[in-house]
Image (cartoon, rainbow, N blue to C red):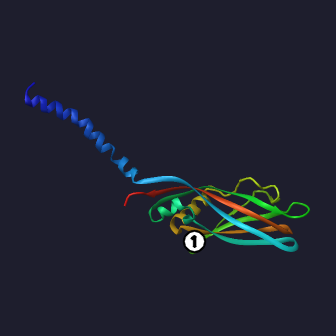
Amino acid sequence: MNLTNYRLVLSLAALPMIATIFAGCNLFDKADNITFPSQIEVLWVVDEEAVATDAPYAYVKTVSLADDPEVEKYMNKLKNVEVEKITYRVEEYVAEGDAVMFKNGKAIFATAGSAAVEASFTASASGVNLQTSTSDTDLIIDTDELNELASVLKTEKEIDMNLTGILSKTPVSFKIVATFQLKVTAEVLD
């Protein structure tokens, strides 16, 4: 084989390798990002001592992405935040007599300068039985509201969660644990 034919064969053999290298360039773009799950818990401690029927309840907690140390490491490099779901459960319930119901329960999410997103704790008007709601239950919120909530969290890094409703009777004490199930994408390279 003469030198010209040898160069032609090498050039033809190199073309697929060069094409593979250029096609793989988007892999380098994706390698700049990391996607991981995150769980952020919010705890309400309720201790209503007054004797009452149909007592209104309202309390605000701030949900911050910085509450998850893994997310905090990438706080200034967030590419995407997805809220997959929000769950709640009741712990350490104490009340005498019939079970206390949490009626008309709502979680209202809001940050300064953004529209409020509202979602009901339950689809039924009967409310949540605080004595038996001890396992994680999905907060009923539609996909558009979850997307709006995720957008605010990505931009603001935190959001206020207002819990409102009516306690069927007091005195009662319990804890509500709300868990935000997130998927976070962040840039890992400078």
Estimate the x, y position of residue 66 in percent, counting from the top left. Answer: 54, 65
In the rendered image, the residue lying farthest to the right is 97
Instruction: Give me the residue at 18% from left, 35% from top.
Output: 11
Mark 1 = which residue?
A: 114
Task: Quarter of the image for the N terminus: give it.
Answer: top left
Left or right placement of residue 108 versus residue 114 in this view: right
Estimate the x, y position of residue 122 in percent, counting from the top left. Answer: 75, 58
Instruction: Give me the residue at 66% from left, 70% from top.
Output: 61
Task: Quarter of the image for the C terminus: give it.
Answer: bottom left
Is any atom of residue 116 visible in this view? no
Q: How crowded is mark 1: few (under 14 residues within 10 Å), some or many (20 or more)?
A: few
Is any atom of residue 78 visible in this view? yes
Q: Disc 1 residue type? A: Ser
Relative depth, front residue between 99 and 20: 99
Instruction: Give me the residue at 76% from left, 59% from top.
Output: 90
- Residue 94: image quadrant is bottom right
- Residue 140: image quadrant is bottom right
* Badge 1 element: loop
In the rendered image, the residue lying farthest to the top is 1
Numbered label tally? 1
Left or right placement of residue 167 versus residue 14 in this view: right
Left or right placement of residue 15 versus residue 99 in this view: left
